[in-house]
Image (cartoon, rainbow, N blue to C red):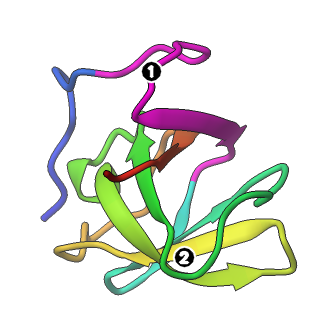
Amino acid sequence: MATTNSQAAVIPFGTSNAAFAQLSSSVAPTRSGTTATILLASTTGLNVGSVVLVQGNDLVEYNGIFTISALTLNTSISYAMKADPGASSGSAIVTVDKVTLG
């Protein structure tokens, strides 16, 4: 069953933080089981294996820090969620930030 994310801490769009480089906002993600896919304006700077922070979804399973498992035509990323949310995200806009580790 999906969990509503009503009190999550969100880094505001455009906020500067040395650990995160905000790349783009997107439309609501789609899913197939535990794999989420987000359409972005650009995937510049991302690769399979890049770590990203996804936030702003109304279902908590879509939000968090994930490793990109697939890139499609430089416009979408896919990642594995910890659990199947049981529904599609109803969020119109989410943010994706590249996480710099180290």
Q: Position of residue 17 (x, y in %)?
A: 44, 21
Residue under label 2: 78
Residue farthest front in this picture: 102
Left or right: 45 in relation to 82? right
Residue at the location (84% across, 49% down)?
41
Disc 2, SS = strand
Residue stretch rendered in magenta on the structure: 10-28
- Looking at this view, is 59 or 10 the one in front? 10
Q: Nearer the viewer, residue 10 or 49?
A: 49
- Quarter of the figure that contains the N terminus: bottom left
Q: In the picture, residue 9 is in which quadrant?
A: top left
Dominant secondary structure of the magenta stretch?
loop
Q: Is residue 27 left or right of residue 2?
A: right
User: Where is 17 relative to 71, above or below?
Assistant: above
Instruction: Say what secondary structure mark 1 lies in.
Output: loop
Within the magenta stretch, is there residue 13? yes
Residue 28 as seen in the image, left or right of residue 59: right
Choose the circle earlier in sequence order: 2 or 1: 1
User: Can you give x and y, in whole percent of width and height, for residue 61 in the image?
Assistant: 24, 58
From the image, state whether disc 2 or disc 1 is nearer to you: 1
Decide: is 50 above or below 12: below
Residue 17's disc number: 1
Q: Reply yes or no: does residue 18 show up in magenta.
A: yes
List x then y, in percent, for residue 19: 40, 34
